[in-house]
Amino acid sequence: MTFFDHLRIAWVHLRERKRQTALTALGVAVGSAMLVTTISVANGSSSNVVTKVIDTAPHVLVDAERIEPLVPDNVIGYPPGRVSMVGKHVTTEAKELIKNYPDVAKRIERVPGVVSVSPFVVSRVIARNKTRFTACAAKGVVPLLEADIAGLKKNLLDKNALEELSRTPNGILVGNLLAAKLDAGYRDRIVLVTKNSEEYPVTVVGRFSSGFNAKDEREAYVNLSLAQRMEGIASNSATGIGLRTADVGRAGEVAAVVGRLTGYRSESWDETNRNVIEFYNRNATITLVLVGFVFVVAGLGVSSVMTTVVLQKVRDIAILRSMGVQSGSITRIFMLEGLIIGIFGVVVGSPAGHVICHFISLIRFEASTAGVIRSDRINIFETPEAHLIVIVFGILIAVLSSVTPARKATRYLPVSILRGQVGT
């Protein structure tokens, strides 16, 4: 028997049971549609996080922690086997700093792929506005340098806030959620209280909204000189340096070069935010596994239909075997039936998944501040690869589900069937 003979017999079997065949194919279609939708939602969630991270964090972050220790300045020369290490003015509150950051920044600027460099000083303070107060991180920056480092310019809610911050020595740019917490508006004066209980009155010059709830609720920007005074450090010192690269995909390579050049620990954006990215990727994987069980249920439906067909076609099987049809041909006929059901299912389910994704992308709701990222929609990222995976997986499940019934069909003895004794 040729392949087309097998296919014709399989099609006749399925056509005789139209309702069962349609319902089984519908089960595969539902599984396909749900899996396409889930993959698209999971990809959309992960890509949204990555996009937000890239837009709101430096591509490379140079930390004050040294990976190459400095040689003490009192050790000029020493014979082999004798080293003198002397710590000067060491206190328990000594800060790790990038000393002489202008020189370090100049060296970083020469690294290929680096577009902009912005030093910063982070100061942990308590922001107070009359009777309202909350802990926050005041990040001291050079406003015009920081504008493009972490997408700060495009996240501004007040267009000229950065220019005004650069003109206002005691100005502060606050996250929109932090401003709401403090009930602080434009040109309001609030007080920053340092860990040494020193108070620094500042004027609100604008707000920003990054989309990360934690950042918008706990971060603010001040001028670099003000942050240095609050931390009590020299004017040529910084706690870190943020970089923006020409190609975000090569941030890891740039970080490695910068680390070797400066001796300070340098991390790319994906290393710095690894926990957040892994959290979303892990949730996406768990969701995909759970939804994948829909296909398992659909596979059980295919297996059930194939078993019913085998039981109803035992006489046909016996006649075919008596005519000399090999057991392998019988197996192929019933596996082709599973293949046809799988093809019908994914042909309907894949486009249905696309339609569902389209309608989900149109849904809008009130943005919540409860999660990590604030969003007013379910992000969908639909790819051809998702449809291809679902099509292959759907057909494979349908075919594999028909293997056991197909093999069972070949175990019936033609003589026993023709005598009315159905058995092996």
Image: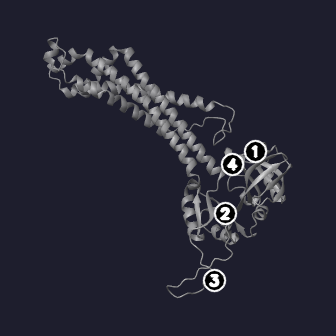
Whole-angstrom CA distance, mark 3 to mark 1, is 50 Å
Residue pointed to by mark 4: 215
Residue pointed to by mark 3: 74
Q: Residue at x 47, y 39 (%)?
A: 385
Q: Marks 2 and 1: in contact by CB < 8 Å?
A: no
Q: Position of residue 279 (x, y in %)?
A: 54, 45
Q: Residue at x 63, y 67 (%)?
A: 108
Helix, strand or loop for disc 2: strand
Classify 274 as above or below 27.
below
Q: Looking at the rendering, which quadrant does residue 73 occupy?
A: bottom right
**Local crowd at mark 2 within 10 Å, few (<14), some, or many (≥20)?**
many
In front of the other: 424 or 353: 424
Q: Type of residue at label 2?
A: Gly
Whole-angstrom CA distance, mark 1 to mark 4, is 10 Å
Quarter containing the N terminus: top left
- Residue 159 shows in the view: no
Q: Earlier in the sequence, mark 3 or mark 2?
A: 3
Q: Type of residue at label 4?
A: Lys
